[in-house]
Image: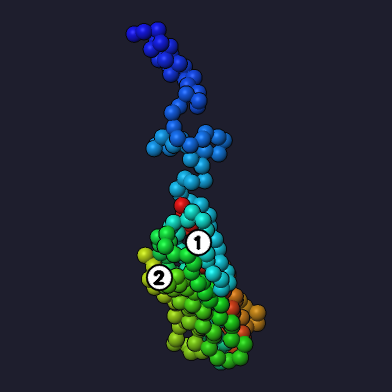
């Protein structure tokens, strides 16, 4: 081994090879990294999770620069609770909204129309609760929907049906609202159903989170359901 070879091995062993000795394309800097193709590239160009957007009202999703794939989660709104006919009539809670989750390649998709469902409003006069609104993502090729939960019907034998998810890789229905003196609304992936509370009568409780159903009221107002939500997780 010549002296030059011994010096090279010693330098490598001592971990003293400087960036200036590397042969690679691009420019080394504090914001670049050396990739396996022997090129210095901006760290921001690295594939992986880039951002998350949460939509709580109707909007348009516009693909950010560099984003190629997304995971879309669509949650429908919850239905509200009914107001039963009397203190002895069982109240019925509203159903939880449906949920759909989808992985999409958006390389050729520039934007999507987003609809976020409104929660059902609790019945204030004797009658059925209000239905929750549907939430959806529509980009011209894919339509992903979480339907709203049904309002609790003013009947001892009915129920507030849960919404459904459609066109997702994963589709999960909302929980059915309970028909009982202790009535509760159905829960969803992102929300809890409201329970009724004793205030001299059983008053329907409002749901919490996103997509929960309101509790039913025994001759008192039903609880409100909560609105839906759309979550877009974005990857480079």
Q: Using the image as rendered, state which of residue 26 and residue 134 is in the foreground.
A: 26
Marks 2 and 1, how far apart in space?
Answer: 15 Å
Relative to 194, 175 lies left or right: left
Residue receiving disc 1: 63
| Label 2 with label 1: CB-CB less than 8 Å | no
- The quadrant of the picture occupied by the N terminus is top left
Q: Where is residue 176 in the image (x, y as percent from the top left)?
A: 45, 77
| Residue 108: % across, % down | 42, 62
Say how many tags the image has: 2
Vertical comparison of 83 with 31: above or below? below
Whether residue 24 is visible here, answered yes or no, is: yes
Name the spot of residue 92 as percent of width and height, x first. Answer: 51, 83
Nearer the observer, 121 or 82:
121
Spot occupied by residue 199 in the image (x, y as percentages of width and height): 65, 79
Please tell me the numbered disc located at residue 105.
Answer: none
Residue found 39% across the figure and 71% down from its top:
141
* Residue farthest along the left direction in this orientation: 1
- Figure check: 23 above or below 176: above
Q: 65 or 163, which is in the foreground?
A: 65
Residue that appears at 51% across and 79% down: 133
- For disc 2, the neighbor class at 10 Å (few under 14, some 14 to 19, many from 20) is few
> In this rendering, does residue 193 appear at all?
no
Q: How is the image coloured?
A: rainbow
How packed mark 1 is, by other alpha carbons closer than 10 Å (few <14, some 14-19, many 20 or more), is some
Q: Which of marks 2 and 1 is nearer the N terminus?
A: 1
Identify the residue at horizontal 54%, vertical 84% (top origin): 130
Furthest residue toward right = 199
Q: Is mark 2 on a helix, strand or loop?
A: loop
Q: Nearer the viewer, mark 2 or mark 1?
A: 1
Secondary element under disc 1, as helix, strand or loop, is loop
Name the residue carrying label 2: 142
């Amino acid at each position: 081994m010549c002296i030059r070879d011994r010096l090279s091995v010693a330098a490598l062993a001592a971990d003293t090879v400087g960036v200036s000795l590397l042969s690679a394309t691009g420019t080394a800097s504090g914001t670049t990294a050396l990739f396996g193709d022997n090129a210095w590239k901006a760290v921001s160009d690295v594939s992986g999770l880039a951002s998350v957007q949460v939509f709580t009202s109707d909007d348009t999703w516009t693909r950010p620069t560099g984003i190629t794939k997304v995971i879309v989660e669509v949650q429908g709104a919850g239905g509200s609770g009914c107001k039963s006919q009397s203190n002895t009539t069982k109240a019925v809670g509203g159903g939880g909204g449906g949920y759909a989750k989808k992985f999409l390649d958006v390389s050729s998709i520039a934007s999507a129309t987003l609809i976020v469902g409104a929660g059902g409003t609790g019945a204030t006069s004797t009658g059925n609760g209000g239905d929750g609104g549907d939430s959806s993502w529509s980009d011209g090729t894919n339509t992903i929907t979480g339907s709203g939960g049904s309002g609790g019907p003013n009947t001892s034998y009915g129920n507030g049906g849960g919404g459904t998810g459609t066109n997702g890789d994963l589709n999960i229905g909302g929980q059915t609202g309970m028909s009982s003196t202790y009535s509760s609304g159905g829960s969803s992936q992102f929300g809890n159903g409201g329970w009724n509370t004793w205030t001299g009568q059983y008053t329907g409780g409002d749901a919490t989170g996103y997509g929960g159903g309101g509790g039913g009221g025994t001759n008192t107002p039903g609880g409100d359901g909560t609105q839906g939500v759309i979550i877009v997780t974005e990857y480079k």
